[in-house]
């Protein structure tokens, strides 16, 4: 069995080349104006600042603009809502990204819900999730939507397969609905799940996103399974013990270079799509 490496970095580079052409066409139709992705960073979390910078760099690579808004750590919910309202009202802004997580005193869900559905390019609103879950047009949450694009690109069979995912609102629940819409049989696991190794050992597709380094052991992985590791931790390891899992895998995402680049490429792609729809 030849193991397929689901190379998100290479695919993301291909997507960016296509997006650069689409951005150029938008400029030609829009008096030289490019799509703009607005990113909101609240506080000074180093990891969040890095993610925002990476998204800004991706915008630059495809020829579009990014507007970076940084609010103090002490910001209130009302102050953040005011920033979102201004971006909603600005016709030059194609997409809005509120970087997760925000400081604890802010009602993050309330702020997510105030993002205009036409600019919700990160797929964080309940309305966007609901539409996606019902298989209607919506911008999917960027990481799971990127995972699905990666699986489709490498022609990984999904229909009829058994998949195990987590239940986080930004990855587990959306990817569960996306896989279900693709006719997989989906099991959602969480911290209270019993017999987790046994459940994972029966899965054809495992999406690891638990936030703990190498929590999912290679011994749990079924022979011939597809492993998508959405985690990243110091030492360049993910949430799956890939060193032990790879010999069993039909396909897997490397860490780094698998899921991460696809998240950013999907976010930019959905921003470009939003700009095209507004013309």
Image (cartoon, grey):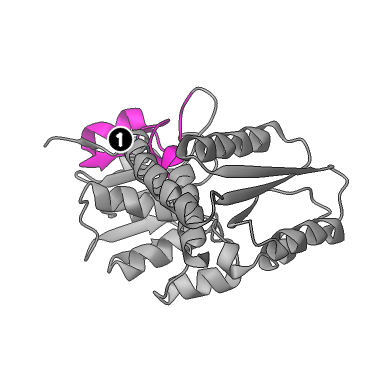
Drawn side of residue 258 relative to residue 210, left or right: left
Taking the view exactly as shown, the residue that stands out farthest to the top is: 235
Instruction: Classify the position of the N terminus by image quarter.
Output: top left
Q: Please state which of residues 215 and 77 is positioned toward the viewer in this rendering.
A: 77
Above or below 201: residue 135: below
Q: Which residues are magenta?
A: 236-262
Residue 52 lies in quadrant? top right
Quick one: label 1, few (<14), some, or many (20+) residues within 10 Å? many
Determine which residue is flagged by label 1.
245
Q: Secondary structure at mark 1?
A: helix
Using residue 248 as the reference point, say whether residue 188 is left or right of it: right
Q: Position of residue 240 (x, y in %)?
A: 41, 38
Q: Is residue 180 magenta?
A: no
Residue 109 appears in view: no
- Give residue 181's position: percent from left, percent from top: 34, 70
Residue 212 spot, x, y in % from top left:
54, 39
Q: Is residue 219 left or right of residue 128?
A: left
Residue 104 shows in this picture: yes
Is-magenta flag for residue 240? Answer: yes
Q: Nearer the viewer, residue 159 or 267?
A: 267
């Amino acid at each position: 069995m030849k193991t397929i490496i689901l190379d998100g970095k290479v695919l993301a580079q291909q997507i960016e080349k296509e997006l650069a052409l689409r951005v150029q066409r938008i400029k030609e139709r829009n008096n030289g104006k490019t799509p703009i992705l607005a990113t909101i960073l609240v506080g000074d979390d180093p990891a969040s600042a890095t993610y925002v910078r990476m998204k800004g760099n991706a915008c630059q690579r495809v020829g579009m603009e990014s507007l970076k808004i940084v609010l103090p750590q002490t910001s209130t919910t009302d102050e953040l809502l005011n920033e979102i309202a201004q971006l909603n009202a600005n016709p030059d802004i194609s997409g809005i990204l509120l970087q997760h997580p925000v400081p604890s005193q802010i009602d993050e869900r309330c702020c997510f819900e105030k993002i205009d559905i036409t600019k919700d390019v990160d797929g964080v609103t309940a309305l966007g999730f609901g539409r996606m879950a019902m298989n209607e047009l919506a911008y999917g949450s960027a990481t799971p939507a990127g995972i699905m694009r990666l699986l489709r690109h490498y022609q990984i069979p999904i229909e009829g397969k058994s998949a195990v995912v987590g239940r986080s609102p930004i990855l587990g629940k959306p990817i569960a609905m996306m896989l279900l819409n693709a006719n997989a049989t989906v099991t959602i696991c969480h911290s209270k799940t019993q017999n987790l190794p046994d459940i994972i050992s029966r899965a054809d597709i495992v999406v690891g996103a638990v936030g703990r380094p190498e929590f999912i052991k290679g011994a749990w992985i079924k022979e011939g399974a597809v492993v998508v590791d959405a985690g990243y931790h110091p030492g360049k390891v993910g949430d799956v013990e890939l060193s032990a899992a790879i010999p069993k895998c039909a396909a897997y995402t490397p860490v780094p270079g698998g899921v991460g680049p696809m998240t950013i490429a999907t976010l930019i792609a959905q921003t470009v799509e939003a700009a095209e729809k507004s013309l």
